[in-house]
Amino acid sequence: MKTFSPSFFTRRRTAGAGSAPGDSSLGVAQADDFRRLVLSHLDGAYNLARYLTRDAELSEDIVQDAVLRAFRSFGQFRGGSARAWLFAIVRNCARTAQASASGRMALVVPESHLGEEAVAKLGHVADAGPTPEETASRQSDVDRVRSAIEAIPEPFREAVVLRDLEDLSYAEIAQVSGVPVGTVMSRLSRGRTMLAKQLLPSGEVQPEQSRSVK
């Protein structure tokens, strides 16, 4: 996963049309809070943008634009999850960038067209392989999982990325996506089902186990 330094939010070019709203003047204390609360989530912001757009270069521009917008609007931030707040801005910037690039929004597959809710239990691949063969095999697995996630249509891909990769709570995902928690859970379950069908051999997708809401 790409790693950003705090200086990353210096503008390179704008991902979306128009100027970022808000007042860019922050006091020293607010600027320190911004660095502590927001800039620590740059890697996750890029990860979300990367999976939403499927475009690495565009994602860098989206994150820069989103962080600048967050910086200029930080005076209006009233607490809560700074990560969810930033991710919501990233999501909006991604939508704007996609609309500007294609002239239209990406097609969202209606949830009613999908099958039964289920979940795939995906394990974490161990780190550190000493041999080139193990490294190549691991990279192949990473690429396969990335491709499988990118193949999931929105908004289910978004739910899987935010929950399973970024570990946001259901409430935080609801804040980012602007939908009820129940919708988040439904999208996540269906997204995991689609991911499992691509990654696991036929017949290994298990019924979803009950999960407590974080």
Image: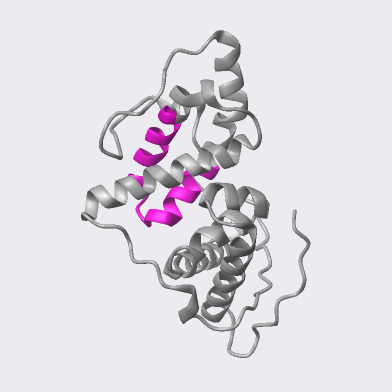
**Is 185 located above or below residue 42 in the figure?**
below
- Name the one closer to the observer, 57 or 214: 214
Coordinates of residue 47 in the picture (x, y in percent): 49, 49
Task: Identify the image's colour scheme: rainbow, by chain, secondary structure or one colour.
Answer: one colour
- Name the one closer to the observer, 39 or 5: 39
Residue 151 highlighted magenta (yes or no): no
Coordinates of residue 82 in the picture (x, y in percent): 60, 34
- Residue that protrudes farthest toward the bottom in the picture: 203
- Residue that protrudes farthest toward the top in the picture: 28
- Residue that protrudes farthest toward the left in the picture: 103
The secondary structure that most of the magenta stretch takes on is helix
Quarter of the figure with residue 125? bottom right
**Is 82 located above or below residue 196 in the figure?**
above
Is 21 situated left or right of 13 in this image?
right
- Name the one closer to the observer, 62 or 95: 95
Residue 58 highlighted magenta (yes or no): yes
**Is 77 located above or below residue 44 in the figure?**
above
| Picture residue at 47% right of the left edge, 63% below the top | 155
Residue 130 visible? The answer is: no
Coordinates of residue 152 in the picture (x, y in percent): 46, 69
| Picture residue at 57% right of the left edge, 23% below the top | 35
Picture mark count? 0
Residue 207 visible? The answer is: yes
Is 157 situated left or right of 183 in this image?
left
| Picture residue at 55% right of the left edge, 70% below the top | 191
The part of the chain drawn in magenta is: 44-69
| Picture residue at 22% right of the left edge, 55% below the top | 102
Is 199 situated left or right of 46 in this image?
right
